[in-house]
Amino acid sequence: MSESADLVLKPDPRTWASLLREPDARALRFREQMGLPIDGPIVMSGHQADFWHPGIVAKLFAGHALAASVSGSLAWLVVDQDDNVPTKLRVPVQAADGTSGVRVWDLTPGAMVPSATPTRCRPAIEPSHFEGAAHAAMRSDAVQSIREALLAHANQPSLAHQVSRAALSLLEPGVPEPSLLFACDLHRTDLFAELLASLKRDPQAAARAYNDACEAISEAGIRPLAIREGAVELPLWRIRAGEARMPVYSTQLSETPMEELAPRALLMTGIARMGGCDLFIHGNGGAAYDRITERWIEHWLGERLAPMVVASATRMLRIAGDDLPTEAQIAEARARAHSAKHDPAIVGDIETSEKKASLIAEVARAKEAGENPAPLFRQMQELLSAYRERWAGKIAELEAEGERMQSLKEISAIANDRTWASALYPAEDLNELQTQIDRALGVTR
């Protein structure tokens, strides 16, 4: 395992090449049908159609590096049956007075899209202009580059195609485009038809195995399928252009056209790892849920999937140095400032703190005995009043520090956020990440 504060590659990336499995005839047929190469190993990764943050781009870089080391190719699986919203892009901004904030760039203002509409079911867009001053820590031409990339791919058949190709183009030069396959196209393959036949033949067996796997690995947070008398929820979505995706039940299979069926997450990666690749690269989250896929497919069909590995990275925008507080540190400073007037221990006055604790105990005893606790309360207030006067300077310092930390909250949130679109980062930051990953995998470019 290669793991540091900003890069995770596990297991040891030097072992990844040895994990590649040999494809069988069914896998080669799947690759032919999906337009993937069949003359060498295939490494696969993927994500939703979006402007990916560096943690996702790390999977792409790792896939390219591994594929290069084994004379293979990289395939990128676009999760286009997902209902994520890539048309609302968060951008850090900076006002004329230097204060920072975040603006959501609505690429399609006024567009009315039903909730839960997959990116495959939405048309390509003509993006709006960004209004505002982008933050100085960003790549200077980032916003304009994103818009130009979307316009260059405005002829694509769906928003998923457009955004995925635009996001990939923003990583160039130096990053070759992988072979793209889209989850909503998997229905075209013999492998999908084979699995669909198994679902039709015994939907309850498939769902029970699925649910058992979800329960066994409950920490991944995958919801089980509904099993009702006469109808079983299947790991499929029904998708139609311009509409929200709908769950599919066993009673609906006969009336649902094949081209309107798309796999849900576990079935999707199951298909990809059965036929599409010889090794799959996940991020931390995907690796957690795909342990369920492995258990489910093995118990349901008795099959083993291509191995998976993990690649992820953390990169922050370089804003105002490296000494900005975290959200937890800001909250702690605010809490100390608030508590200082009431808790003498905050300023180190242990003697007064112990006297206060003793009075609190006396108040409790008096109440329990039915005595009047008011004199004890007055004594405590007098104690705290004297304490505040004696330590006024220190308390004021803590309050000033709390206010200073609060003033940094907005800029700190920006600086400590790892999920900004990678296109916003200066090119040298992504080049450095790629070099770090290449080095870990023993690849020289």
Image (tube, helix red, strand yellow):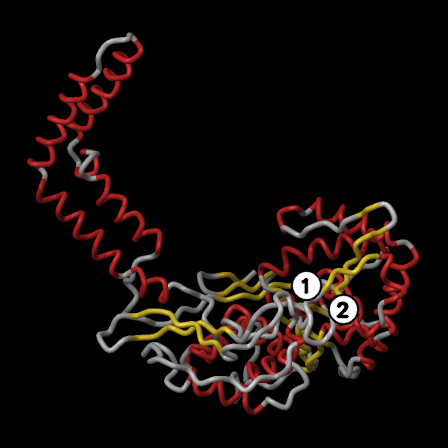
Q: Nearer the viewer, mark 2 or mark 1?
A: 2
Measuring 57% from the left and 84% from the top, which residue is drawn there? 125
- Please say if 384 is above or below 232: above
What amino acid type should be assigned to the residue bearing mark 2?
A: Ala
Residue 417 image offset from top left, x and y in percent: 41, 64
Please state if 148 lies on the left or on the right of 248 as rendered: left
| The C terminus: image quadrant | bottom right
Measuring 30% from the left and 70% from the top, which residue is drawn there? 100
The residue at which mark 2 appears reads as 262
Q: Where is residue 317, by image quadrant? A: bottom left
Residue 112 image offset from top left, x and y in percent: 58, 74
Please state if 420 lies on the left or on the right of 77 as rendered: left
Decide: few, some or many residues near mark 1? Use Cα within 10 Å; few <14, some 14-19, many ≥20: many
Task: Find the residue positioned furthest to the right.
Answer: 201
Q: Under tag 2, what secondary structure?
A: strand
- Please say if 369 is above or below 184: above
Residue 130 image offset from top left, x and y in percent: 42, 82
The residue at which mark 1 appears reads as 308
Query: Sequence-wise, which precedes: disc 2 or disc 1?
Result: 2
Q: Nearer the viewer, residue 385 or 327?
A: 385
Residue 261 image offset from top left, x and y in percent: 79, 69
The number of numbered discs placed on residues in the rendered structure image is 2
Q: Nearer the viewer, residue 41 or 269?
A: 269
